[in-house]
Image: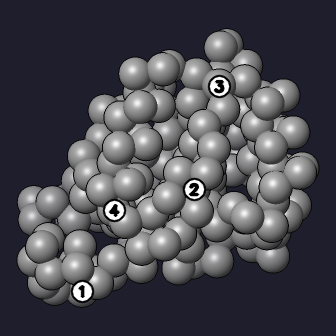
Amino acid sequence: MRGKSDGRAKITQETDSQPRRHGATRSGGDDKEDMADNPLSGRKVLIVEDETLVAMMMEAMVEELGATVIGSKARVGEALDFIATRHHEIDIVMLDLNLGGTRCYSVASAATGHGIPFVFSTGYQDGDIIEEWRDRPMLTKPFQLSELQGALALALGAGLNAGQA
């Protein structure tokens, strides 16, 4: 049964543990098979997260998915500088919505401006996100490896970059 849609991209946990955006279709298969065919293999990921332990967990999960962490930043300014100077190296950004009490929309804009897709992660209610960014994949902390994989693949596959904003 589908509820009223507000147009926001959400990652939900389905009964078969495969995350997806509301309204998206899902192919069959088991998790091990999906991991073997992972489109994240070799991708370069920037992690923007202010909680050290959470950042370390994300780094380990990203690497387990076959991607490479090319940077981990804890502050908005650091993330903006990294994107400005190394945007050509970044395939996707994992972006904490709230960095030390500051919303990271400027980082989302910078990534989008360079055509880099991203996934929000948050420990807050998704109703707090501004309308402009509600179509982007968002993970609610804590999340599972399969949820992270699905959100990253969704952002990469959907072309959620500057042309889609």
- Residue 63 position, x and y percent, is 38, 54
Relative horizontal placement of residue 123, taking residue 29 as reference (left or right): right
Give the amino acid type for the residue marked by disc 2 in the picture: Val
Residue 153 seen by the camera = no
In the rendered structure, which disc, 2 or 4, sits on the residue that comes first in sequence?
2
Considering depth in this image, is 61 or 28 the residue closer to the camera? 61
Graded by Cα atoms within 10 Å as few (under 14), some (14 to 19) or many (20 or more), the crowding at tag 1 reads few
Residue bearing the label numbered 1 = 27
27 versus 127 height, above or below: below
Q: Report the amino acid beneath label 4.
A: Leu
Callout 1–callout 2 Cβ contact below 8 Å = no
Residue named by callout 2:
45
Relative to residue 21, is residue 31 drawn left or right?
Answer: left
- Label 1 – label 2 distance at C-alpha: 25 Å
Q: Residues within 10 Å of mark 3 (few under 14, many from 20)?
A: some
Task: Give the label, 1 or 3, closer to the camera.
Answer: 3
Camera-side mark, 1 or 4: 4
Residue at the image point whose x is 85% and y is 64% from the top? 114
Type of amino acid under label 1: Ser
66 lies above or below 99 = below
**Mark 2 Cα shell of 10 Å, populated few (<14), some (14-19), many (≥20):** many
The residue lying at 84 percent from left, 39 percent from top is 80
Question: Where is 17 relative to 48, above or below?
Answer: below
Q: Earlier in the sequence, mark 1 or mark 2?
A: 1
Q: Which mark is residue 74?
A: 3
Residue 65 numbered tag? 4
Mark 1: secondary structure: loop
Mark 3 and mark 2 lie on one chain; the one further toward the N terminus is 2
Q: Quadrant of the N terminus?
A: bottom left
The answer for how far apart the CA atoms under marks 2 and 4 are is 11 Å
Q: CA distance from mark 1 to mark 4?
A: 19 Å
